[in-house]
Image (cartoon, coloured by chain):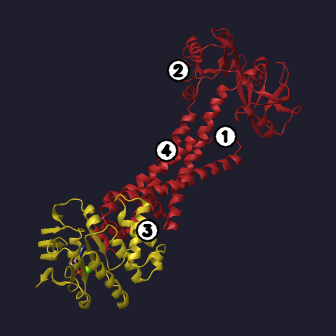
Amino acid sequence: MSFIKLMAKNPFRNRARLALSVIGIAIGIATIVALGMVTDGLKLSVEEQLKTGGADFVVVKNTTSESSSGSEAINEKRVDEISKMNGVKQAAGISTSGMTVNGDRLNLAGVNSKDLNMLGAKITQGKAFSADDKNELILGKLASDRLKKKVGDTVTLNGNKYTITGIFETGNVNLDSIGALPLKKLQKMDEEDGKVYMIYVKINSGQDLKTVSKSVEKAYPGELTSLASLEDYQKADNSLNMIETATMAISLLAIIVGGIGIINTMIMSVFERTREIGVLKSVGWKSRRILGMILGESIVLTLIAGMVGIILGFIGIEVIMNFSEIPIPLTFTPVLALKALGIAILVGIIGGLYPAIRASRLAPTEALRYE
Amino acid sequence: MNNENIVEINNLKKGFDKGRIKALNGIDLQIRKGEFVSIIGPSGSGKSTLLNMIGALDTADEGLIRVDGNDLSQKNDLSDFRSKKIGFIFQLHNLIPNLNVLENVTIPMYGNGYNSKQMSARAMKLLKYVKLQDKATRKPTELSGGERQRVAIARALANKPSIVLADEPTGSLDSKNGQMILKRLKELHEKENVTLIMVTHDMNVASMADRTIKVLDGKIQT
Ligand SMILES: Nc1ncnc2c1ncn2[C@@H]1O[C@H](COP(=O)(O)OP(=O)(O)OP(=O)(O)O)[C@@H](O)[C@H]1O
Ligand SMILES: [Mg+2]
């Protein structure tokens, strides 16, 4: 039997204890995996949104600059100006708002009918609205499922009836949960004539995305910001960073709590096997080998916990999201799994080190006298 | 060849409890290569302490101890010496409970350059020697006391030691099983020319040896 196999067998001697310590660490790892799936999903969704459809980048109000008024609205005149800039093929002003429909929240995007291509939405049932002065609406697939509305039905927005002309799909959870209506209509509803919240920009082929997006920013210093990548997005919106910080804090906590649990388990295990460790020394095992064995046992334990935790976290968050009202996209990547296993191994090393050192330093005669 | 000393001890002293207990109080002892020596004496006289010193499980406070050419008081890491030169048999078999008999015998071979196959093959040979080859895959708990002690003998021989040290090897056995273990040890000494040092309470057992050494209050009686 190889040394590794010999070592891997030891944690299975006391199965109840193994199960308890595995569960303790697995819960921490599961939390890390679940939160990781949420952050990764959100990131991917943002990236998708940035990439979806015709828009190459998005322009928003620069709210971090001192010269900004703090308002997030952009003067609609900018849309026209940007569309005439070098390298720009098309610019679309978009307004956003949230409404309550039959007690359900529905996020709305106002967009001119000629700019609907910029949303990257594929109409799968019915047709898109064609005029900008009619009370017409298209719904994302998820929104239509949730509201139980189909083509031809009407919804009441702010006291006015709107007819659903079509259902669209983008493949992006966030976009598929909204409704879109003519920009003018939404501006009127919100009493925000002449104001938009985002400008979707499409560049001419052959143009460099970075150059064009930067030139827009430079044309309106302190007023507008271009979001061309996930990094740009994270700079403009802190919520992703906050979730990531929270994940880090919880990971750290899981490492500490798990580490303490492992120290306890391994100290007990070493204590119970004092005599045996004395025998290993008497037959000539080096201190280093005993240290390696105990440390290895600790890592075996946390690796099992890591694998259990990954499965638990995966199933757990999927179940929770199944019952959740807000659609949060979940993504499970091999990188996340490796990260979870890496943390598990780290806990194994941190938690196993002290018991292993103690075992390796036991005096053989003392250990052999131990009853 | 036979008059070469494998163990050479001069004025060896060892105390415990910050010197309050004088376990060994000036031991002088020479043992020749291939000799079978028994150590006898009352409880607490220092027999185990002396045996542990010879097996490099503990270090002396004072005096000289040289075993098979190694000055033990000069060495820092004694694990290599223990692995290559010494085979220990204790009163309690001290087998590892979650490993089977064969695996227990392979334990001393780790780190000595054998692969798993070679270790198993050598362990099997040793189990044949103690006539336990058909129990190779049993767990220690499924064996009788005498059988466990025979496994311990096989384990002690794993690395072909030049000295076998036995601390009351029959102490926990009935007389029939005890006789069997003693027969094995005597045979080992006679056939393989292994130096055998055995601690015992029992005068009858002690008399099987070539020479009997009496220990009293940490000193050798002459
Ligand atoms: N690790 C230790 N710590 C403290 N005292 C010890 C230790 N080892 C041995 N002693 C003491 O040293 C003395 C000699 O002990 P030792 O075990 O060598 O006796 P022994 O002759 O083998 O006795 P027994 O026949 O009962 O096994 C005893 O007084 C014992 O209590
Ligand atoms: Mg003793």
| Inter-mark Cα distance, 3 to 1 | 53 Å
Label number found at residue A291: none
Check disc 3 and report the residue beneath it.
Answer: B103
Same chain for mark 2 and mark 4? The answer is: yes
The subunit letter for the residue under badge 3 reads B
Same chain for mark 3 and mark 4? The answer is: no
Label number found at residue A65: 2
In the rendering, at what x and y percent does residue A261 appear? Answer: 46, 58
Amino acid beneath label 2 = Ser
**Mark 4 or mark 1: which comes first in sequence?**
4
Residue at image location 63% in from the left, 13% down from the top: A206
Could one spot residue B170 in this view of the protein? no
The subunit letter for the residue under badge 2 reads A
Amino acid beneath label 4 = Ala
Chain A's shade in the image? red
A16, above or below A72, in the image: below
Of labels 3 and 4, the one closer to you: 3
| Inter-mark Cα distance, 2 to 4 | 29 Å
Check disc 1 and report the residue beneath it.
Answer: A328
Q: Residues within 10 Å of mark 2 (few under 14, many from 20)?
A: some
In the rendering, at what x and y percent does residue A49 appear? Answer: 66, 28
| Inter-mark Cα distance, 2 to 1 | 30 Å
Check disc 4 and report the residue beneath it.
Answer: A249
